[in-house]
Image (cartoon, rainbow, N blue to C red):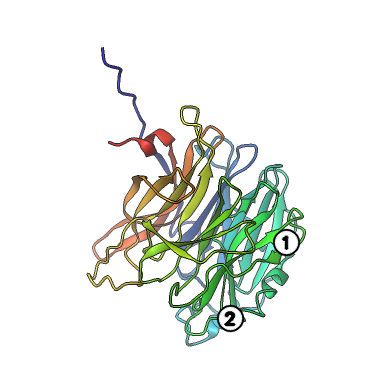
Amino acid sequence: MPAATPVISPPEKINLFEEKTDGFVSYRIPGIVVTAKGTVLVYCEARKFTGQDWGEIEVHAQRSADGGKTFEPVRQIAHTGPRLPRNPVATDKKSKKSVGGPTEQTVNNPVMIADRDGTVHFIYCVEYMRSFYRRSEDDGVTWSEPREITSAFEEFRAKWPWRVIATGPGHAIQLKTGRLVVPVWVAKSEAAAHANAIGSTIYSDDQGQTWHAGEIAVPNDQHTPGTSENIAVELSDGRVMLNVRTRALANRRVVSFSKDGATGWTKPEFVPELLEPVCMAGLVRHPGTRSSPQPFLLFSNPDSLDRADGKGVPGERRDRKNVTVKASYDDGRTWPVSRLLQNGPSAYSDLAVLPDGTILCFYENGGENAKTSWPYKYLTLARLSPEWLTHNP
């Protein structure tokens, strides 16, 4: 008799944050890590009065001790101390991001690193102008007092006189050497608040005590205009691949490689199989499974270049929909596996892997209504098996 076809369960999905609840208009910019002990930490921006990138914004987090099936209550984890002055860019009339009153505070772009020794490193920005570091020694239950690390970004000024800085977003990484590497972008803000930015990293070789700027990895030029949000992964040979959002005419993701995550970045190149609708993406290394022990890369983003208005101008932002997870078995040279995770409006996403190999995708999820496709109604966590990803239905 022929062997029975294995039953492959569909992804389990749970909405963790919903817009217009608990006094916040919107929850955006998802990030996720799994600690050395297997605790799942999810985090995001909680936007108080508007859904815009600037304004009264906090960082909220939830914690799960059962692999993302249930979660503890939401907690605010970033910058609960004295409020800081607003970035002058926020009130610059030429900026399309000019929102919020003079006393509002933007706390933005949260990024965590799950250290192999159990520490969780946490980096975030305030007013896209200053950056702070916290750490947790108890799997995200408590956090150290914030310590400013803006000096690392000041090292960029000689080559790129910025007015705006941002980490990630999503998660950052620890290399086999122990180095902590955080993808960042810094912008001159000449035409708009986030305009004219370059992609790079900051790094620490002493467990987060001191931080330094890496070399510019992805410039803002005719080849890669509109550089911004990026994410990194360590490859099998120890190199670091930076995967970057741009507004390049090719509408494809851009990658650059470094031997140490900070220096000697290669010339940026496009990845034909990774569409770029001008949106954040997720990227993580999976250690492999019992049946398939070879490690592989996972990538997630809205896999679409559609535009509702039908214009589809090269380099311009496309509709944010159809978040898809892809897999590569050759360190990102090709991406032969692709599975649609969320049909319809969906946007930013981040990825993590549980100790048992289960894949977690934390992403912005929306719905259709009479007027528009809105991809930001929920922040949803999906638990999916590697078998579901590779299964060809």
Q: Is residue 275 above or below residue 339?
A: below
Q: Position of residue 159 (x, y in %)?
A: 63, 79
Report if residue 25 is visible in the image.
Answer: no
What is the crowding at mark 1: few (fewer than 14 residues within 10 Å), some, or many (at least 20)? some
Residue 298 drawn above or below residue 206: above
Mark with earlier residue (2, 1): 2
In front of the other: 75 or 30: 30
Where 354 sits versus 349, above or below? above
Q: Which mark is residue 146?
A: 1
Q: Position of residue 206 (x, y in %)?
A: 77, 55
- Structural distance between the alpha carbons of marks 2 and 1: 23 Å
In the picture of the structure, the residue carrying the numbered disc 2 is: 102
Residue 261 placement: quadrant: bottom right
x%, y% of residue 283? Answer: 49, 51
Element class at badge 1: loop
Report x, y in % for residue 318.
33, 66
- Badge nearest the viewer, 2 or 1: 1
Q: Is residue 147 left or right of residue 88?
A: right
